[in-house]
Image (spheres, rainbow, N blue to C red):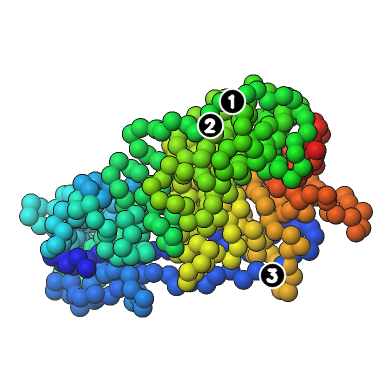
Amino acid sequence: MKRLVRLGRLRGRAAKLGGVGLLAATVFGAVMAVARPAWAVWNPDAYGNPPGGSPPYCSGLHTPNPQPCAQSVPGISYSPSLVDFGYIDNNGGSSTQSITITNNSSQTVELTGVGSIFYFNAPSDSETGIYCTNAPSGSDTVQLAPGQSCTANVTLTFGDGQYVQDCYPANNTTCEYYYAPSFFVAPASNPNDSTGFYVPVEFVVGPPGGGPGIPTTPGPPSQQGGGSSTTPAPPSGPIQPATGCHQLPAGTVVAALATPDGGGYWIVDSAGQVSNCGDASPVFGQLSSPPPSPIVAAAESPGGLGYWMVSADGAVYAFGDAQYWGGANTLPTPLAAPIVGIGADQATGGYWLVGADGGVFSFHAQFEGSTWSDGITGLSGPHPLAAPIVGIDGSPDGQGYLLVGADGGVFTFGDAQFHGSVPGVLPPGTHLAKPVVGIVADPATGGYWMVASDGGVFSFDAPFFGSVPQQLPPGVQLARPVVGITAPASGQGYWMVASDGGVFSFHEQFYGSAA
C-alpha cells in the first residue's frame, strides 16, 4: 500500500447508476421476470479528524465495509457534481479540473482545503490544488460571504508507472474509480466548528500514450479506448462494391442500417457482405473475403455516406466516408468478453464498441462510462449483469450512448436519457418469450425501441408502429430469429431484419430483403 503524507488520503467511490426504473412502455408478447443485481454503493470512509474540528475527516479509500462520509453540507454547493478528469497515463501524466464552491448560506463561512497529497513510496503520484485559488499565499483557507464563490484547480498526477493502489479491482494497470477531494466549512465566527465534505471525481489511469491497457480476465475490460497519437492501419484488406439488393446466406445476417432519408437500407452479414436495397448506395462496398473473426454489428457514419462493421474480436472495418480510428483487436491483452455492438459518435465521427460484459471502448469518441462504472462486475464476479449486453446506440448529439441487455435492461451514459427498461415494467411472474437483440434511438423523440428475437417490439417514449408477433397467425413462428432493428432520421417507422435476411417493415416502405 502506498503511504500518504500531508492530511491523508482522499479516495472513495460514488454511484453513477446508468438507469433502471419504472416507466411506461408498449410491450407485446410474453415477458419474463428478471431480477436486477443488487450491490452496495461505495462511499469514502470516515477517517481521522480535521484540524480543530470534531466531525470525521472526509477522505479514505473504499473498503469492503465502507462508512458514509458527507457528500454535501447545508448551505454549500459545488459544481460540477461529478468531476471527470478523463484518461491519465500512469507514467508522468496529469490532468487538471476546476471545482467551483459557492456559499449559499446567510452567513460568512471559512472554507479550508487539504492542499496537496503525496506518497512516501511514490512521491511522483499526487493530488494538488485542493484549495481555492484566491486563498492567501501559504494558506488553504478563504472566507466566503453569502452568495460568494471560489474555484479550486485540482491536479491529479501519476508518475511512477506502476499500478494505482485501491483501484477497482485492485492491482490492475488500468481502472476507473473515484478520488474525493475534501474541504471543510465553518462559520467565520467559530472556525473550530467545521464540517467536512467531499467532491466525487472520476478518471481512468493507464499506460502512457492513451492506450487502452485492458486488465486480463477475470478483471473488467478497458473502459477507455483509443486516444493514441497515431492510428493503426485498418485491418480490412481489399474492398469490393456491393451488388444490389440480393440474397445472403441464410443464418448469417447480423444487422441492417437505414439510409438517412428512409429510402432504403443496407443489410450486413457475418462475412462482411452487403445487400443494398432501395436507395442504399452500392459504392461504399463490402469485404472481398471473410474476416478472421465474424462480423457481429454495423453502424452508419454520421453523414450517411458510409458505415463501419465490427467483428467479435473488436476489429473495425470502415467503408465510404466512415473513418477508421482503431479497434479493440489491437489491444495488448485479450478481451474479457466478445464485442457485440458498435455505435457512431455523431459529433466526432468516431465510434464506441461494447462487449457482452458491458465494457465500452471509445475511438475518437468521448468515453462516458460503462456498466463497470456502475459497480457491475461484467458477466461474473460479486455483482454481475442480470443478462449479457447485446447492443449500443449513440445519442443524436454524440454526447452519450445507451447499452441494452438481453433482458431489456438499459444503461445510459453521458447525455443519453433513460426512458425505461423491460425489467422495470414487467408484471411479477412474467417473462420474455425471447431475448432482446437490439436497440435503436428514436431521433424524433429521444426515446428508443428494442426488439426481441421473435420480432416483439418494446417502445419507450417512442411511437409503437407494430411488431412481428402481431402479424403472425397463431402458432406460426419465424423461420429465423430477428437480429436487429433500424430506423430512419424521421423516426416515423422502423425495419427489423432476421438472420436469413428477411426484412419486416413497420410504418415504412418495404424495399426488398436478402432472404
Mark 2: few/some/many CA within 10 Å (<14, 14-19, 20+): many
Which of the two discs, 1 and 3, sits closer to the camera? 1
Q: Measuring from the top left, give residue 222's x and y in whole percent.
A: 42, 52
State the residue position of label 2: 236
Instruction: Tell me the SS state at disc 2.
Output: loop
Q: From the viewer's perspective, is residue 300 above or below residue 53?
A: above
Q: Residue at x 75, y 36 (%)?
A: 248
Q: Amino acid at mark 1?
A: Ile
Q: Residue at x 53, y 28 (%)?
A: 237
Q: Residue at x 29, y 51 (%)?
A: 99
Q: Measuring from the top left, give residue 396's x and y in whole percent.
A: 56, 39
Instruction: Tell me the SS state at disc 1.
Output: strand
Whole-Å distance between the Cαs marked 3 and 2? 42 Å
- Left or right: 196 as drawn, with respect to 464: left
Q: Measuring from the top left, give residue 20's x and y in whole percent.
A: 57, 62
Whole-Å distance between the Cαs marked 1 and 2? 7 Å
- Left or right: 510 as drawn, with respect to 79: right
Q: Which mark is residue 239?
A: 1
Q: From the viewer's perspective, is residue 494 above or below residue 274?
A: below
State the residue position of label 3: 33
